[in-house]
Amino acid sequence: MFQKTVLQPPPTETIDLIKSYNEFDIQLYDYARKIFEERLSAHVPSIEVELKKFKFLIWLSTLVKWLTKSRETLSVITRSEGQTTK
């Protein structure tokens, strides 16, 4: 019913002609990519610092929650021991 059509790559001359017509587009793309990569790499260290700060704050928050819970537990234990000794 259906026949599968196998596409052949265009001849080298055609590719070269397309590249010549798009020479300025290709140069503009390469220039824009270079600027993008430079700006991105300039921000990577600051992004890494912010990520470390964020991870530290998460760790600190977890520690505070754990200490608060431990203090509450200790308080309950201390109160219950004080009640049994009276």
Image (cartoon, grey):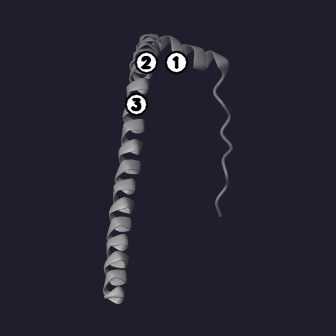
The N terminus is located in which quarter?
Answer: bottom right
* Horizontal arrangement in the rendering, residue 44 relative to residue 72 (left or right): right
User: Which of the image's four quarters has the C terminus?
Assistant: bottom left
Instruction: State which mark lies toward you, 3 or 2.
Output: 3
What's the mark number on residue 29?
A: 2
Q: Percent x, y for residue 57?
A: 35, 45
Type of the residue with mark 2:
Tyr
Q: Label 3, label 1: how many angstroms apart (C-alpha)? A: 45 Å
Is 12 rendered above or below residue 50? above
Residue 78: percent from left, percent from top: 35, 76
Q: Residue 18 shows which numbered tag? A: 1
The kind of secondary structure element at disc 1 is helix
Q: Please state if 13 lies on the left or on the right of 35 as rendered.
A: right
Report crowding for label 3: few under 14, some 14 to 19, many 20 or more residues within 10 A (C-alpha). few
* Residue 50: quarter of image: top left
| Mark nearer the N terminus (3 vs 1) | 1
Give the residue at mark 3.
Answer: 49
Residue 76 placement (x, y as % from top left): 33, 77
Residue type of the residue flagged with mark 1: Ile
Which residue is at 36% across, 73% downward? Answer: 73
Quarter of image, res 80 = bottom left
Q: Is residue 52 above or below residue 82?
A: above
Q: Is residue 5 left or right of residue 35?
A: right
Q: Secondary structure at mark 2?
A: helix
Q: What residue is shown at x 68% (from left), y 34% (from top)?
A: 8
